[in-house]
Image: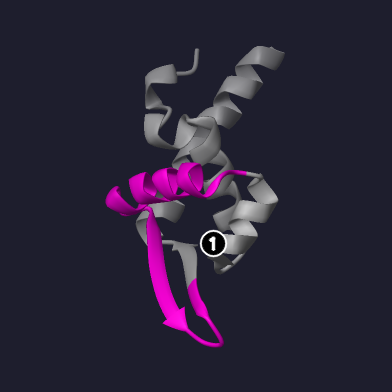
Amino acid sequence: MPDFEKLDKAIHEKGRLAIMTLLASRVRWSFQDLKAELKMSDGNLVSHLRTLHKLGFVAVTKAVLDRPQTTYALTSKGRSAFTKYLEVLEQIVRAGKA
């Protein structure tokens, strides 16, 4: 039987899971691209990104090019936490198929 307690509660929340999944798929994402892809409000997205950043899962880079731009990327800690999270989910899926 899988150990459901091993699911990282910070990642398991729907919005943060979506963010982590997208961040795992590319080196970095701009705030505007994340917002468009996830169809989240600015406030909701900022709140989730702030939580993930405080946990050390997401790095934030701010730059001024033609206009100010903020990008986000998984840290090595975030990538490791996400990998462990997926491993637990895979165990749950396998148990459900048995």
Q: Is residue 17 magenta?
A: no
| Vertical arrangement, residue 78 with respect to residue 17, above or below | below
In the rendered view, would you say 5 is above or below 21?
A: above
Q: Residue at x 71, y 15 (%)?
A: 97
Spot occupied by residue 16 in the image (x, y as percentages of width and height): 49, 40
Q: Is residue 19 left or right of residue 74?
A: right
Under circle 1, the secondary element is helix
Q: x, y percentage for residue 52?
A: 38, 48
Residue at 37% x, 53% y: name it.
57
Identity of the residue drawn at 60% across and 56% down? 34
Q: Can you tell which quarter of the image residue 81 is in?
A: top left
90 vs 65, nearest the viewer: 65
Q: How many marks?
A: 1
View extreme (bottom): residue: 66
Please state if 29 lies on the left or on the right of 84 as rendered: right
Badge 1 is on which residue?
31
Who is closer to the viewer here, 6 or 54?
Answer: 54
Q: How is the model colour-coded?
A: one colour
Image x and y of residue 8, in percent:
40, 32
Going by the numbered disc 1, the residue's amino acid type is: Phe
The residue segment tinted magenta is 40-69
Q: Position of residue 24 (x, y in %)?
A: 57, 56
In the displayed structure, 65 sits above or below 47; it is below
Q: Does residue 65 belong to the magenta stretch?
A: yes
**From the image, which quarter does the C terminus lie in?**
top right
| Residue ID at (51%, 50%) | 42
**Res 72 seen here:** yes
Is residue 86 at least partly visible in the picture?
no
Vertical placement of 5 versus 68: above or below? Answer: above
67 vs 76, left or right, is: right
Label 1 crowd (10 A; few <14 / some 14-19 / many >=20): some
